[in-house]
Amino acid sequence: MPNNHNQNSRRSFLTKLTRGVVGATLFPSIVTARDQQRNITEFLQRSQKFSANDHLQIALIGAGGMGTADTNTAITVPGVKLMAVCDLYDGRLADAKSRWGASIDTTRDFREILDRKDIDAAIIATPDHWHKDISVAAMNKGKHVYCEKPMVHDISEGAAVVAAQTKNGVVFQVGSQGLSSLGNEKARELLRDGAIGKLNYAEGFWARMSPSGAWQYPIPADASPQTVGWDAFLANTTKRPFDATRFFRWRNYRDYGTGVSGDLFVHLFSSLHMITGSMGPNKVMATGGLRYWKDGREVPDIMLGMFDYPETAAHPAFNLSLRVNFVDGTGGTNYLRMVGSEGSMTVEWDKVTLYRNAPTADANDPLAKTKANGTQGKEFIYDRKAMLPPEKMEYTAQAGYKGAHFDHFYNWVTAIRNQGKVTENSLFGYRAAAPALLCNDSYFKNRIIEWDPVNLKLVNT
């Protein structure tokens, strides 16, 4: 990125800061709070008028933990009604009726849901190996789709999802639920305005320590070939005898899940790409290991990824490092941190903390030049101090903010009603999923992977 662009952006940010209206162009409801010990806090507020003019009837396919959370959020958007639930475990179908009402229909066969004319859209929250097949089938039936991340189980599947959305003209949103957050939007604005100068490095970290957080999900006592649709679960992958552990703890196995990278790195890729406007890295490297959760799983519980992002019209060249730790005693730490030539910012879904470097002397300052040359005669040098901007600013969501998950569903529903656009369509979702999936490939193949993020293809393979 040209230096004059960074200088202009920097001046733009400082001008806004001086006037006390940083971010006002994007968030008109920002209110500046107290300036205490040179720390400034600003509150972010989402002002939306909700309307239930158009009734949207949805179905859930995959009623596990994430599918349940998605549906609970979706039905809080005005005008959204849940009509049916599909899952391969009978216990979840019974729970769905108990949770959302006896009037909803339940089935083990997702095709029954897609054939219904009274269902407008589907939430797809199945294990990863079914994302592509059900997404494409749903869009070919004219259904709008909200598909959990990662969008696909393998990079070879991404093109089919993009083609199905293009062909059918439906609204498709990938469920990296933090993407539509106030925090990401504020970070994008701050980066654009030069708040941290020229971006050169980013890092993300995600830590978990509990058995559930490390995917040791509970296995129901009644799990059996009679209560579980095991053959349907395996219909598009390797056939095996019934195994309740594989069914309920599917993230631990490569046939069905995408490991820590597909579960967690993809969130960080999604946010980073949204903030920077990037299409993705061109080099992927990973290492790690299975250090603690040696429960028969096939994927590591510690993973470190390194990624090179090339210079584009949207951003300078920069490096990214990501870490996931399932043996962490801190209990759930996670963040995305972006570092530039003038400062850094830590991005969370409801908060952004900006740290700026202490200002340095201006080489073009004539007073500085005079001092450098020494005094001449009786000339007096007044070393006047500057008015310093704050070194730390914290932007926090206003109390009552409905949260990133609600925003993501609200955007999806609004796009369906208004024939509009979403923040994470199939192409964006493919570009976020690809480096996460390639991170796994790098780990298991023990080599560097080169990727063309523009044309979405492997290089030199």
Image: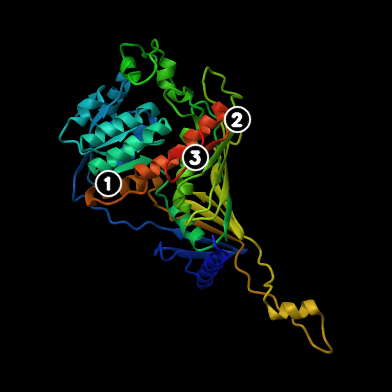
Q: Secondary structure at mark 2?
A: strand
The disc, 3 or 1, on the residue closer to the chain's N-terminal end is 1
Q: Position of residue 229 (x, y in %)?
A: 31, 17
Q: Nearer the viewer, residue 186 or 339?
A: 339
The answer to whether residue 301 is left or right of residue 96 is: right
Q: Nearer the viewer, residue 79 or 423?
A: 423
Residue receiving disc 3: 451
Q: Give the farthest residue toward the bottom.
A: 378
Residue receiving disc 2: 288
Query: How are the residues colored?
Result: rainbow
User: Type of residue at label 3?
Assistant: Trp
Residue receiving disc 1: 413
Q: Position of residue 418 (x, y in %)?
A: 23, 52
Q: Secondary structure at mark 1?
A: helix
Q: How many marks?
A: 3
1 vs 2, front mark = 2
User: Type of residue at label 2?
Assistant: Gly
Question: Vertically, is 213 above or below 49?
Answer: above
User: Type of residue at label 1?
Assistant: Val
